Image (cartoon, coloured by chain):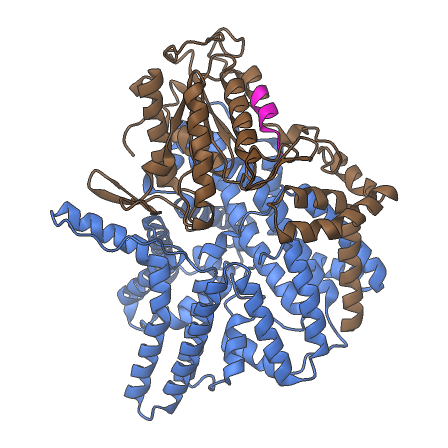
Chain colours: A brown, B blue
Amino acid sequence: MPAGRVLVVILVALLTWTLMYAPALKRAAEASPLGLRRSASLVVLTPIAAASEFFGIDALAETIERAVGRPPRAGGAFVPPPDDVPVVPDPDPDDPGNGDGSGNGPSEETEPIRVPAPTRRLRVAVIGDSLAAGLGYYAERVFRPRLVRVSRQGRISTGLTRPDYFNWPLAMRRIVDSWDPDLVIVMLGENDHQSIQTVSGQRVAQIGTGEWPAEYRTRVLQMMRIATSRGAKVVWAGLPMSADARFSEHSQRQNDIFEFAASISPNVVYFDAWERFRSPRGGYTAYFREGGRVLLIREGDGLHFNSVGYTIVAREIAEVAAQEFGLLPRTFETEL
Amino acid sequence: MLFPTVDFAIFFVLVFLGHWLLNHLAQPWKWFMIAASYVFYAWWDWRFVLLLATISIIAQLGAIAVARCRTPRTKLAATALAVTALLTPLAFFKYYAFFAVSATNTLTSIGINSSLPLIQVVLPVGISFFTFMAISYVVEVYRGEFPVAGWTDTFLYLSFFPHLVAGPIVRPAELIPQLAERRDERHVDVAGAAWLILGGLFKKVVVSSYLAAQIVDPVFGDPARRSTADALFGILGYAIVIYADFSGYTDIAIGVAKLLGFRFPKNFDRPYAARSIQDFWRRWHMTLSRWLRDYLYIPLGGNRRGERRTGWNIMITMVLGGLWHGAAWTFVLWGAYHGALLVAHHVRARRTPDVPPEAWLRVAGQRVATFALVCVGWVFFRADSLEIGLSLLGRLVTGWSTPNEFVTPLVVMIVFGMLGLQFWPRGMGLWLQAGLSRLKPVPLGLVLSLAMLVIVILGPAGVAPFIYFQF
């Protein structure tokens, strides 16, 4: 086929695809960080998505999505689709107390975390963004399976500023109500360097303004309240320093909010990952010294941890839980 | 810039237009394509562009120096110098952290409290691929198999965006002559290209992403608590993931090159249908296999110096091939494992030659055995450590009483479906391509958009990086 006609093929394919998929593309653009790229994408996609919906062209994508068992991704107000809601594990067949709320009732006092047994294992949920997604895998290694059951609930690209993209308070409520964890480990915030929106996508606090910390603190406190509402203990891990210094100041402000919120919330303790994994000179380092050994703990992206790093983070969090909530040392590995 | 993104789609439309508009103007076309390729690469990090340009300059200066040397000895010295200079950035970026940590810990263990600077080194995407191509160019000039190319040709050969970040590793003779020819704008194989691009997208976006998230990551993340079936399908799943991920990328790269009128060498040829480990390496990452053969194994002496020396040459080649994939002992082990299998294959082949005709049962047995051996190797390739790899293999026999968590009918179907495709008749693809090529531009565009829509809907939100980018 001549090149000119091939160009027609490519343009027809791309434009038709864009038209059919525009609402979902627009939603993805809305969920991306604020900036020129997001603005430009929305300027282009908003009229295309409107046309797609007006003429019913998006119906084909929705039909295919339903045919393959997925709810349509397009749409106005946020309704959490089943595949976006964390899948909590089935009840533990060996655990008679699982899921019925009898493990720990709501409590305002700091009581020690319950003593697990092989027939009634401790339930640990790891919540948050991609850092938590990585941490979840390695928490499974660190906590001893005979006594602890870990539920990995990390969701990439999520945070507390954009419930129109992923509604963490709602997801947390479902996890707490249906699985009744004993310990909740939270690690999120790396995607929250942006203005805060409501569930329906309206901006409520512009980043960089005085409203932002107040609104963010409200959301953090809400998450802590939900997580502890059935008696669970919470270890809230702060953001670790990243190699990209552009966001350092903002991340530190977020950490201040996490730490403050934890200090006034019963059954919540803050783990200072920033301080724990920085270099002795106070800057970013990808390495960690332990027992005379040097270990590479960060990925090349300067943000995420590698397998060794996540294992250390999980172990340190378990140690914090042991110290603050009486988690038994025999429930987790202390060596790498 | 990742292939399966809107960014790349917009980039490619612009490049396609510029490419064919400038096709008849040799030099402006080359400058345009170099600029486009550097923009493609700078999308990750503009600083990487400096490295790519530096490698291109070293390769060209090296080739010129080698060509100007009069005596074999000076030619060899110039080649060695150029290859060393080309390998130095690769060694630094890829192995510095591994070396610094190992050296510091070794010194500490013998009581010397000293440390190399512990700096974070970010691995530039695709550095291994364009470094190998640069070495290929210098060595071929040294051997007299390829003349010194012009500066623009060398820059474009190394940076040409379809192969830039994950191959295939194209030889100078396969690409540089094509840069000098005028591409035929009357005959663009759009059906063949679409088949490769959509097939590659399907493998990457749907198959690889699904299996990785559904079973491979959780199984390799914590093998000690997985059931036998989870462990087995985690391993089989990873065999499919790495094949779908890498061959998917290569297919897209070859298809994109095809739309621009270029021919790239094949990189995969149904590797899991191999009947021996040697056969596997003739089908898996074929352009790397032949690179290792031509620029490492044969210069080491190949099979010309007796059985024992051949064995050593294979082992050295495969261990270095393993290390090329990453700075970790698991990659070294993976390379050594394949080296040992290849040595065993050579010894056996010399002593018991095959006797045709062969029964189908024997052929099937060879295929299953080869696939099983390859899968064992993948365990160590994917595992974070030797202990994790051994733990996972152990669960194959000790995990019977553990309930299954990750094996689902869909996982089983995808694994066996993808394995079944290794035996898909070659003519079927051509038949479908022929059907596509009969369509007029607008209907063809509509069919392709529908296929893209299905792929995007079946895939997860976002696209994970290609596994081979890190190599």
Task: Locate the C terminus of chain B and report the quarter of the image it occupies.
Answer: bottom left
Q: Which of B380 and A131 lies nearest the eye of the viewer?
A: A131
Residue B126 seen from this side: yes
Q: Is residue A239 left or right of residue A203?
A: left
Displayed quadrant of residue A207: top right
Question: Which residue lies most toward the right here?
Answer: A55
Q: Which of A139 and B6 lies nearest the eye of the viewer?
A: B6
Question: Which residue lies most toward the left here?
Answer: B111
Q: Position of residue B225 (x, y in %)?
A: 42, 27
Q: Position of residue A137 (x, y in %)?
A: 44, 33
Q: Is residue A22 left or right of residue B161?
A: right
Q: Main secondary structure of the magenta part?
A: helix
Question: Which residue lies most toward the bottom here?
Answer: B70
Question: Which residue lies most toward the front here?
Answer: A210
Magenta span includes A172:
yes
Magenta span includes A195:
no
Q: Residue at x 84, y 58 (%)?
A: B443
Q: Which of A223 and B361 lies nearest the eye of the viewer?
A: A223
Q: Residue at x 62, y 28 (%)?
A: A85
Q: Which of B401 and B457 lies nearest the eye of the viewer?
A: B457
Q: Say above or below: A88 vs A119.
A: below
Task: Locate the N terminus of chain B and report the quarter of the image it occupies.
Answer: bottom right
Query: Which portion, as a residue range, is magenta?
Result: A166-173
Q: Say above or below: B358 vs B156.
A: above
Displayed quadrant of residue B40: bottom right
Residue B288 seen from this side: no
Q: Position of residue A123 (x, y in %)?
A: 45, 18
Q: Residue at x 32, y 60 (%)?
A: B315
